[in-house]
Amino acid sequence: MTAPLSGPARLRRGACTLALTLLGVLPSALWAQPRFDLHSTQTRLPTTVLPSRVQLVLDVDPDRDTFSGEVTIHLRARQAVPAIVLHAQGLQSDSAQLQQGRTTRRLKVQPEESTATWRLTPQDGRPIATGVYRLHLRYRGEVQRSGEGLFRADFRVQGRPARTLATQLQAVHARSVLPVFDEPVFRAVFDIAVRAPAGYQVLSNMPLLSAQPEGAAVLHRFAPTPAMPSYLLAVAVGQYDVLEDRAHGLPLRIFTAPGKREQARFAMQATQQVLPFYASYFGRPFMLPKLDQVAVPAGRQGAMEDWGLISYTEGALLFDPARSSPRTQRRVFSIVAHEIAHQWFGNLVSVAGWDEIWLNEAFATWMANKASAHFHPEWQTVLRERLGLQRTMARDATSATRAIRSGPVSESSVFEVFDGITYDKGGAVLSMLEQWIGPQAFQRGMASYMAERAYKPATAGDLWFHMGRGTGLPVAEVAASWTNQPGLPLISVTTTCEAGTTVLNLRQSRHAQGEPLEGGPWQVPVRVARGTDERSLMLKTASGRFELPGCPEEPLRANAGGLGYYVVAYDAAHRARLAAAFATLPPADRVALLSDSFALASSGLQPMVDHLRLLAALPEVQGSGRAVLISLALAQWMALDTALHGSAVQAPLRAAGRALFGPELAHLGWQPAAGEDTEISGLRASLIRVLASLDDEAVITQARQRLAAALAPQGGGLATSIRGAVIAAVGVQASAAEFEALLAAFEATESQEERWVLLAGLSAGRDVQQARRLLEQALNPRLPPDIRSAIPGTVGGNPLHSSMSYDFVVQHWDTLQGLAGSGPFGGRNWLLPDAAASAHDPAVAARLLQDQARLAGAAGASTAARVAQVIQQRHRLREREAGPLAPVLAGWR
C-alpha cells in the first residue's frame, strides 16, 4: 500500500541495561531479531488449525448494497480442538458445516464482535480431532462506501452515473468479505469465482478460466492463486476501457473508466520498465501469469498491491498529457514502481505480522526510489528524498514517535503503523545501510532472502541473516539499533589539526525538538568527506575519536552524500566555513546542510537567524541540484510562515520571502522553454504557489490572467506544468466570481486528479465565507466520499480557517467518519488532526487530544499525539524566534 501518510513507543530498560547504555555498550539481547518460527509468532487466531486452500464464490451486483458468499476452507487441525476460530466482521451466517471424508457435522456459529471472529463449535458437542477437513460456510455481507472491504464507487462518465465495485482488504478487511484466517502469517491458495450481472467485466488476482452464463448473471471462475495472505485477495467489477501490452512476454493490462484508456499509457510504460528491472535485481522474475492494474475512479485512497491485480485511485495511475503536470508524471511512476515492488516485497515474501510491516513498505519505498533514479536521473530523486524526509525526521525528534519495529500491533490501531516512520524512515535507513554494506553485497543479500523466503512469511531476522552472510559485517546488530528504538541521532562534529593530522571528534545524542529525550546510542555509519576524499566511520558509542590524514583547507562534511538518517551539528567555526563554501559544495551535501540547519534552528539548537543567513546565500548556488535546493528552501519558508501566522513578524517574513524568491521566478519566467528540464518546470510552479501565498500581487495578477486557460477543457494553451499553480495562486485572493468558477469546476469534473487540483486552489483563500462554502461541500452527496472527508483537513491546512474547520469536523463527526473509513490515508483518525494541523496554540493541542479520545477512541491516540507535538513545537518556535527575527527581516534586501 502506498501513500505517503503511531504513537509514543520507547524501549523499556532495566537499571542494568541503562547503565550499559550510558557506558556506550548495547547488550546484544536488546537488539535480538529472531528468524521466523510459527511456534513463537504472536497471532490473534490459534495456530492449532491452519488453512491451506480457500474456495470462494461471491455473488455481487454494483446496484445492490449487499452481497452473498459461499466459501470452502481446506484446513488441518494440528491437534484436537473444541472449536475452529476464524475472522469475520459484519457478516451474517446462513449455514456452517465441517466435512471430513463423507462425514458432515453441523457447526454452531458464535460471533464475537470485540475480536471480529466467529467461533465454530460442533453441534454434537464432540471435539474436532487432529486431521484434514473442509469447512463450508454460506453467509451475507454489506457493500461499503468508504473505500475498504468490498466497496462501491459512484462516478460519472460524460455526465451519466456509473458504478464499480472494488476491494481494499489490507490490513483487516478481508474478514468483511469472507470468513477467513485474516492475518499475514496464514498463507493459503485462493480459488475465486464471482457471479455478477451480465454486461460487467470481472477481474481478480489470476487469469480468467471461464465465464458461464447463469440467467441474467455470469459466473466468472479464475485460476488458483499461489499461497498468499488473505489481505491480497482482489476483486473488481465494472465497465472498463483496457490498455493492453506485454513486458518480456508477460501480459499486461490497465483498466480505466470508459474514455480514460489513453491516460494509462505512461503507467504502462513505467510498468514495462520496472518489471524486468526488479526481476534482474531480485534474481527472480514476476511470478504470476499476468499483471493487471485498475484505476478506481472514486472512493479509494492511495493504491494497493494485490497480487496480480493492483488497484489505484485514479490520480495515482493516470496521466493526461493535456492537463496533468510533470509532478503527476513523477507521482505515477513512483507509485507504480512502489506497488510493483510489493509483488516481491509483501506478496512473494510476506511479513509474519503487522509489527513487521516495514519489511513491505520501507523496501517498496526504497526500491521505487531506486527505479526512479535509474530510469529518470533528470528527476534528481536522491536529492529530493530529503525534502519528504524532513517532516518525518521532525516527528521522530519528538516523544510522539515510535520505533520502526515497535512491538506487537493491535488490530484496532494497525493503520497507525502505515506512516512516515515505516515508509520514509524505513526507506532512508535502508539507503544508509546499503551505502555502508556496499550496493553489490546488499543486492546479493536481497536475492538470497527472496530465494529462501519465497512463498513464506519472514521477519527482520530473516532479512539481516541473508544480508550479513559473506560480508563480514555485523549487519543484524547495526540494523537493529535503527529499527528497534525510536528517534534519530544528533551527530556533533568538531575537528582539530594535530601534527598534520585531522582529529575528528564525533558525539551522538538523541535529537529532540522539545525537551531532551532518552535513547541511543545508535551504531552510526557516518560518511565523511573532504574534497573528493570520502570514507565511512562507524560510531558505535556515545562518542568517538578518529584520525584522518592531513589538514586540508576544505571543511570536513559529515553525512557526505546525504544518505544518513541523522542530523549533523557542527561547531560555530566549522559551520561558518561550510556556509562560506556553500555554493561550491556537492549538491547532496548542500541539501543535507540546509535540511540540518533548519532542523537545528527549529529545535532551538542554533538561532533561526543563522539559518536565514544560509538561505540568503541561495542566489549564489548554480548548477546541478539548484532547483531541489530552492524547493527545500521554499518548504522551509512556508513552515516558518505557518509558525509565525498572526504574529508581528509575519508581514516582514513574507516581504523577505518575496525579495528572496521573486527574482527566481522573474529569471525563469512564466513560459517554459522548449526542452526544459522538468526540475525547472517544477520549480517554476512551486515559486508561483509560494509567492502567491506570500502576497506577491504581481504573481497573483499574472495568475488571474491565466485562470480562464487553466479551466479550459484542453488547458487553453497553458503549460500543464503551471496549471495547478495558477489555480492555487488565484485561490489565495479569489474574487467572488473566481471562487464560483473554481467551485463549479470542482463539482462538475469527472477526474479525480482534477478534483484535488481544484480543491487546493479553493482551500488557499483568505475569505472566511468562501472557506465556509467549501466546508459545506463535505456534505455534498454528489462528491466521492474520499474527497468529502478530505475537505475539512484541506481547509484546516490554512491557519486562517483551522479553528472553523476543526469545529466543522466536531459538529459533523458522524457523517465524516463514516465517509473516511479506517484507512491510513485520510481515515477517520486523521479528521481532527488534519483540521488542527496548522495551529500554533497549545490550547488547541490539548483540545485535540481530548476530542480525539472522545470521538475516535484509543485507536487514534497516536495520530493526535504527533500533531499535538507539532503544534507545541510551533508554539515554542514562535516564542523563541519572533523577537530575534524581527530586525533581520526588517532589514532584508
Image: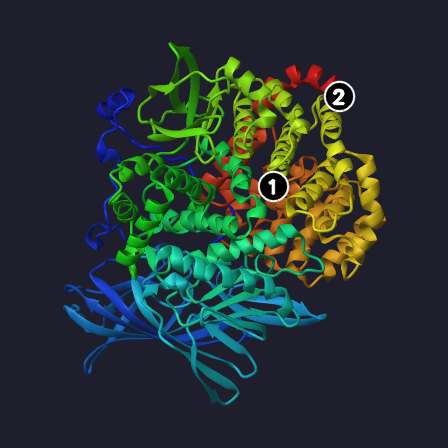
Specify whether 325 is left or right of 269: right
Residue in the foreground of this view, choosing between 790 and 680: 680
Q: Give the answer, above or below, for where 850 lies relative to 749.
A: above
Color theme of the render: rainbow
Label 1 crowd bin: few (<14), some (14–19), many (20+), radius 10 Å: many
In three-dimensional space, the C-alpha distance between marks 1 and 2, rounded to whole angstroms, equals: 36 Å
Label 2 crowd bin: few (<14), some (14–19), many (20+), radius 10 Å: few
Specify whether 14 is left or right of 727: left
Q: Any mark on residue 337, and which?
A: none
What x and y, as percent, mark residue 199?
57, 82
Report helix, strand or loop for mark 2. loop
What x and y, as percent, mark residue 676?
69, 48
Direction top: furthest residue: 499
Which residue is identified by label 2? 893
Q: Residue at x 55, y 65 (%)?
A: 268
Q: Nearer the viewer, mark 1 or mark 2?
A: 2
Which residue is identified by label 1? 835
Q: Residue at x 21, y 73 (%)?
A: 133
Specify whether 680 is left or right of 45: right
Quarter containing the C terminus:
top right
Q: Earlier in the sequence, mark 1 or mark 2?
A: 1
- The three-letter amino acid code for the residue at tag 1 is Ala
Q: Give the answer, above or below, for where 120 lies relative to 623.
A: below
Residue in the foreground of this view, choosing between 503 and 319: 503
Residue 779 found in image quarter:
bottom right
Report helix, strand or loop for mark 1. helix
